[in-house]
Amino acid sequence: MTLRAAIPMLSVVALLAASTGALAEEGRAPSGSPPASVLPAGEGTKEKAAPALARREPLYRLAKGDVFDLDFPLTPEFNQPGVTVQPDGYVNLRTVGQLPAAGQTVPEFTEALRRSYAKILHDPVVTVILRDFDKPYFIATGQVARPGKFDLRGDLTVTQGLAMAGGLTMTARHCQVLLFRRMPEDWYEVKKINVKRMLQAGKINEDVHLQSGDMLFVPTSNLGNIKRFIPGWGFSTYVNPIP
């Protein structure tokens, strides 16, 4: 390439570079570039806050011994009140026979009913109405004042559950409360909770929320293990008698 031919090409390259710089200074992208995102004034350096996850309670699953009614609004002759989930987890229904029910949510079981009755009804409409079912509960045992099974009503935490059980005894190991939670396929998840540290530090956000079927076990402290070997264990052990 001769010098005379190269000079016009260099001029074109310089002109394109100058045009691109001018567009960048004006906040515009050159032709062919992807459009820049436009942010309101003063928000260019702010990060968009991520939405908080909504906490949702799991749907109830049918269990052995549950009782429900079947209601067919369009074909009431198929209504069946007082259906009981048998010990094997099945229910015995008129015209369709045995169907599995235990472990299914009400919407899941309702859909199974629709499929079964669709063999004898056109587009069946059926409603499952629970009558008697296993109400949410938790168990507190070990070194609590009133061990037993308690109704789980509303949103309840571990410390609130222990309070419902009368609180911890003098021989309780406050730093090692165990939470047993049933998982699928009959597995149990065990979580150790240091109630003493949590309350002393005021970290209420670490207070675990209970779920139906949870069991709280409070073990005995080392001092409680040796108390049976100390004669006259009790309040007088710490308080000098009045002369």
Image (spheres, rainbow, N blue to C red):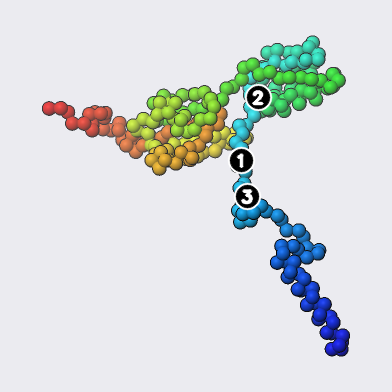
Q: CA distance from mark 3 to mark 1?
A: 15 Å
Q: Which residue is mark 1?
A: 53
The reply, left or right, for residue 141 in relation to residue 61 is left
Secondary structure of residue under mark 1: loop
Amino acid type, label 3? Lys
Q: Quadrant of residue 70?
A: top right
Where 195 sits versus 212, above or below? below
**Which amino acid lies under the numbered mark 2 shown in the image of this protein?**
Leu
Quadrant including the C terminus = top left
Q: Earlier in the sequence, mark 3 or mark 1?
A: 3
Residue 48 numbered mark, or none: 3
Residue closest to the eye, 155 or 184: 155
Give x and y (percent) for residue 6.
84, 84
Q: Residues within 10 Å of mark 3 (few under 14, many from 20)?
A: few
Q: CA distance from mark 2 to mark 3?
A: 42 Å
Instruction: Find disc 2 in the rendering and name its residue.
Output: 62
Q: Position of residue 236 (x, y in %)?
A: 22, 29
What is the number of the mark on residue 169? none
Q: Residues within 10 Å of mark 2 (few under 14, many from 20)?
A: many
Residue 3: name its quadrant.
Answer: bottom right
